[in-house]
Image: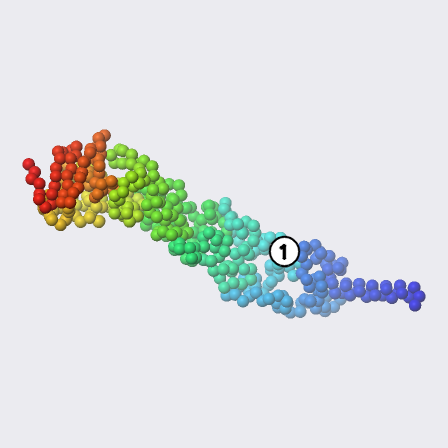
Amino acid sequence: MNFKGIILIVCAVIFSVASYSFDKNCVTSKCHTDFKKFKIIHSPVEEDCESCHEKTGKHEFKLFYKDVNQVCTDCHEDRGGGKFLHGALKMKKCIFCHNPHGGDTKALIRTKRVDATCFECHDRETKEGKYIHGPNISGNCSICHDAHSSDNRYLLISPQEQLCVNCHTDKNYTNSGKKMHTALEDGCTGCHNPHASSFKYQLITSPKKICSECHSDLVDQAKQALYKHPPVNDGKGCVNCHDPHGSLYDNNLKDNQVSLCLSCHNKPIIGTDGKDYNIFKILTENPQKHGPIREGNCAGCHNPHGSNFYKILVAQYPKKFYTPYEKKRYSLCFECHEANLAENPETTVDTNFRNGSENLHYVHVHKKKGRTCRACHMAHASKLPKHIREETPFGKWDIPINFTINKNGGSCSPGCHRGYKYNRINPEKYQ
């Protein structure tokens, strides 16, 4: 074969291949050059358009199936097996979201960002707000939602109560021993907007209002209380003391009651006598702790949300140093202590502070200027048994008490009267 014959054969082969390419691969044709602009070209487009299209005439094609989704599921796994279907999938319109020829993302989404495709149907207001959820601001809705189907409402990729801790791992309290806030049992959206909000942490409303959605009784109490607890109404409000997600302690407290209270009450506080009291210092320096303190129960005497009784006490207690005796005035003390120790003038069982059977508690409180409990006892802690004071405040003077105790009685020699002894077995004779 001469050289001219070889050239003719080569040209015939080239023409044949070119003809095939133009017939089979539209990407290289003069009609669909825009397909080449995609960063990622759908593989059938690169390989053979007739994988999806059937030729019906000169440059006339139709899909193999009337159902577009069926064309897709010939190659792609059917993603519609979940309990909840995406609307586009329910309508069998994969092409609502995907470009069947190519795109700028691996999933061939029609837009450069996932959220732009979503907003063609969904309300763009989900991005409105000063504080926007990270996946939302990055435009990646698929971090939380399955674009095809799911067994969870809103096409969430996990049950709502699990979804958030997929990223917020520090809020996953499984096997941590922490008690989860009951508001989180059904997920985080009771308090947080998962898309965007005008409030920090994407809260659904202001921090001061959000707790009232469930705890309206406590919020109302705090507002109406005559004596208010500053942390409830100042700054962060409830979260000054409570962890809104979960805690090792009851009522979602950030720490045990005593430690939590002392995180503020570790500095001087003005008492009713006008003097400074540092509760941390009192508890640290005095080994004899009042029962509620020993039990770690500050709320046994104080209402942390506010109260109509001074010092945010849970019940009535005399505010003044001297006061005529009435049982109701000592409601706080009598929640734990028997009222008989102050009401029976004679007893051998109600109290050990007696001279024979004469009730010395009764003697002190049943006067025109009845002494209140604080005259002799420290409410939090003391160095002496029975929480007896070493000194009692009286205006500018701290009156020494000089109390001693022995097997059958004791004595005191305070600045307010001469020294007296008492004995339960052999009563002292008073003149």
Q: Residue at x 37, y 46 (%)?
A: 241
In terms of secondary structure, where does tag 1 sit? loop
Q: Position of residue 32 (x, y in %)?
A: 72, 58
Q: Is residue 275 left or right of residue 208?
A: left
Residue 270 position by quadrant: top left
Near mark 1 (Cα within 10 A), the count class, few <14, some 14-19 or many ≥20, is some
Q: Position of residue 263 (x, y in %)?
A: 36, 42
| The furthest residue to the top | 396
Tally the numbered discs: 1
Q: Residue at x 86, y 63 (%)?
A: 11
Residue 374 position by quadrant: top left
Q: Which residue is mark 1?
A: 105
Q: Position of residue 167 (x, y in %)?
A: 50, 53
Tell me if residue 17 comes above or below residue 342 in the rendering.
below
Tell me if residue 179 comes above or below residue 409 in the rendering.
below
Q: Position of residue 146 (x, y in %)?
A: 54, 60
Q: Is residue 401 left or right of residue 140?
A: left
Residue 75 position by quadrant: bottom right
Nearer to me, 335 or 12: 335
Q: Residue at x 17, y 39 (%)?
A: 404
Q: Quadrant of the C terminus?
A: top left
What amino acid type should be assigned to the residue bearing mark 1? Thr
Q: Residue at x 92, y 68 (%)?
A: 1
Q: Is residue 52 visible?
A: yes
